[in-house]
Image: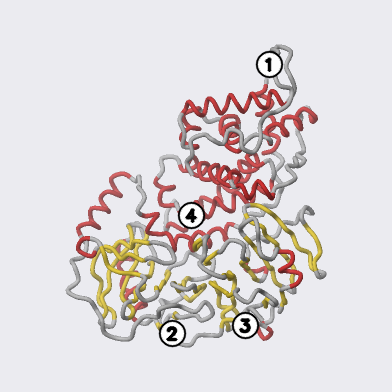
């Protein structure tokens, strides 16, 4: 890239917009909200562009901006209050079990923002634990525990597995405040 | 098993991408520029990790730090104690060829004006002027200009610049956001961001020369084209006032492009060129051509008809109503906070007069 700060920013955003939207959609589970999230993140990206372009991995920095914006948004109590439906928007599934996918989708949608972000970074972005920790601004141990808790919640939401013991819970325990006490970084 | 299901879910979501993006990158660019204007120096003060090149620039900047001025400048008329949000205070008397004013704004303590080749081109020149007493020199050897409104900003001074009409001036900013700061009136300071040419010292030097010429020709408080609003609000609480405005030149007038209402000290601070207050609305009113992408979602969810106009209401971070075809204009009403005094639906349906796209029908009184 060459030229001024603005030219660099414009060039980068044009090249990465589609992938940012996809990441935002995976985080939000909703393309409408995803576009809002990307819109907000792009403003922050511009403000921090001096640091973004100085970062060793521009995409990683950009993903961090997007993910933190997602967590910050979801952490707002007002947003939680007004987002009444909690509805799961339809997603045209590809060659997978549609019903199972909807069940997983519902379970993931019920996760706290940080846990969901952890899963997205691990299983969509394919980042390792250390990389996720860097993006989320927490320790690798926290990433591991958040991942385990998130997967556990999804597993429970999908129903008790045969191997589960008597202590298993048939319904999800996650709620809007669960798991939000992880180290902050906003 | 669970991991693979989660991966499949994420892949399915990502592969269901709708064709048309609703993200307006040009709007994000503009808002980013505006936000940077307010926060530039706080951001620049954060650690930069750019290796030796940055360090070398920083050292060079440090070497060029100005000496303490010989004494205060106290001659001439004083700067305004407060700006009117309805009166553009700044205008350019000279600009380089091909450059023209593209956007401006006013709030209580800050007025700003940008100039570029076109609105969505990178803003080559960004002029800001502060009210009397808002900024003052500080730091050892007066290397900083501290401004306390609309947010605390510290402008780093890097060297003396040619004086402007007898008033002291300094080169300022950081390695990638150079600027010129000067005292434009007694007790009042102005600052103008310059274009940045990272690999062209000749062009950067020319930009500095242009900056001095631009700054010496700026008109303060002079008459400008009228500021007109394409909508008018009615029957609002008596304490509500327009607290900040952004405008664009349009058909020979200055069209209010966005503006916020206030009824007291803002508790959300300043951002995007506006001063927000929780529970009070802010408005953006522009022709469709202003946007790179239409800002209203086309989906049916949240869509309704008010007074015969389709509106889309969303609740993401803030409550927002977007009317994509409101007498030829796109009207966006936004409110932060859980308890707005008047909902966006009510504002659009009961408190808004749409004046259409013709400037002849616009008003200088945003609250009727």
Query: Which of the marked residues, 3 or 2, is nearer the chain's N terminus?
Result: 2
Q: Are marks 1 and 2 in contact (CB under 8 Å)?
A: no
The residue that mark 3 highlights is: B365
Placement of the C terminus of chain B among the 4 image quadrants? bottom right
**On the same chain: label 3 and label 2?**
yes
The residue that mark 4 highlights is: A46
Q: Kindly report the distance in space between the C-alpha atoms of the residues bearing marks 2 and 4.
A: 32 Å
Density class for disc 4 (Cα within 10 Å; few <14, some 14-19, many ≥20) is many
Q: Position of residue B228 (x, y in %)?
A: 60, 81
Query: Which of the marked residues, 4 or 1, is nearer the chain's N terminus?
Result: 4
* Chain designation of label 2: B
- Checking the image for residue A167, the label placed there is 1
Q: Are marks 3 and 2 in contact (CB under 8 Å)?
A: no
Q: Position of residue B60 (x, y in %)?
A: 23, 56
At 37% across and 82% down in the image, what residue appears? B217
Task: Decide if residue A77 is in sight here.
Answer: yes
Q: Quadrant of residue B318?
A: bottom right
Q: Kindly report the distance in space between the C-alpha atoms of the residues bearing marks 3 and 4.
A: 34 Å
Secondary structure beneath label 3: loop
Secondary structure beneath label 4: helix
> Is B268 on the left or on the right of B150, as rendered?
right
Q: Nearer the viewer, mark 4 or mark 1?
A: 1
Density class for disc 2 (Cα within 10 Å; few <14, some 14-19, many ≥20) is few
Q: Nearer the viewer, residue A126 or B145?
A: B145
Q: Kindly report the distance in space between the C-alpha atoms of the residues bearing marks 4 and 1.
A: 49 Å
> Is A1 on the left or on the right of B359, as rendered?
left
């Amino acid at each position: 890239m060459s030229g001024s700060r603005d030219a660099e920013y414009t060039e980068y955003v044009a090249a990465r917009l589609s992938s940012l939207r996809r990441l935002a959609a995976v985080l939000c589970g909703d393309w409408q909200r995803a576009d809002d999230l990307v819109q907000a993140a792009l403003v922050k990206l511009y403000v921090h562009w001096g640091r973004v372009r100085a970062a060793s991995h521009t995409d990683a920095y950009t993903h961090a901006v997007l993910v933190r914006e997602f967590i910050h948004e979801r952490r707002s109590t007002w947003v939680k209050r007004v987002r009444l439906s909690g509805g799961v928007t339809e997603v045209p599934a590809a060659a997978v079990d549609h019903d199972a996918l909807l069940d997983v989708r519902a379970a993931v949608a019920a996760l706290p923002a940080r846990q969901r972000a952890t899963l997205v970074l691990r299983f969509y972005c394919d980042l390792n634990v250390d990389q996720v920790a860097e993006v989320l601004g927490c320790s690798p141990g926290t990433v591991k525990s958040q991942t385990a808790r998130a997967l556990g919640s999804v597993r429970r939401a999908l129903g008790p597995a045969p191997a589960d013991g008597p202590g298993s819970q048939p319904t999800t325990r996650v709620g809007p405040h669960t798991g939000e006490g992880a180290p902050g970084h906003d | 098993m669970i991991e693979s299901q989660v991966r499949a879910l994420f892949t399915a979501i990502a592969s269901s991408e709708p064709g048309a993006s609703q993200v307006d990158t040009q709007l994000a660019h503009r808002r980013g520029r505006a936000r940077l204007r307010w926060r530039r120096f706080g951001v620049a003060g954060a650690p930069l990790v750019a290796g030796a090149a940055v360090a070398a620039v920083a050292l060079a900047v440090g070497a060029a730090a100005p000496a303490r001025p010989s004494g205060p400048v106290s001659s001439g008329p004083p700067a305004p104690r407060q700006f009117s949000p309805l009166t553009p205070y700044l205008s350019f008397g000279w600009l380089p060829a091909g450059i023209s004013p593209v956007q401006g704004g006013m709030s209580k303590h800050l007025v700003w004006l940008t100039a570029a080749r076109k609105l969505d081109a990178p803003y080559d020149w960004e002029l800001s002027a502060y009210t009397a007493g808002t900024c003052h020199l500080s730091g050892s050897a007066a290397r900083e200009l501290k401004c306390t409104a609309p947010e605390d900003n510290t402008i780093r001074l890097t060297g003396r610049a040619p004086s402007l009409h007898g008033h002291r001036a300094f080169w300022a900013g950081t390695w990638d956001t150079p600027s010129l700061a000067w005292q434009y009136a007694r007790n009042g300071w102005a600052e103008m961001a310059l274009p940045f040419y990272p690999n062209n010292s000749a062009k950067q030097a020319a930009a500095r020369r242009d900056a001095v010429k631009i700054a010496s020709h700026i008109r303060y408080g002079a008459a400008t084209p009228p500021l007109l609003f394409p909508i008018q609000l009615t029957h609002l609480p008596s304490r509500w006032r327009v607290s900040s405005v952004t405008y664009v030149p349009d058909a020979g007038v200055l069209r209010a492009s966005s503006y916020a209402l206030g009824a007291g000290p803002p508790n959300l601070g300043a951002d995007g060129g506006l001063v927000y207050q929780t529970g009070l609305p802010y408005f953006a009113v522009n022709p469709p051509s202003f946007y790179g992408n239409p800002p209203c979602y086309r989906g049916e969810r949240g869509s309704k008809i008010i007074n015969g106009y389709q509106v889309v209401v969303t609740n993401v971070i803030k409550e927002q109503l977007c009317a994509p075809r409101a007498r030829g204009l796109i009207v966006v009403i936004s409110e932060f906070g859980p308890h707005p005094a008047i909902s966006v639906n009510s504002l659009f349906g009961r408190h808004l007069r749409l004046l259409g796209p013709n400037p002849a029908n616009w008003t200088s009184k945003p609250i009727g």
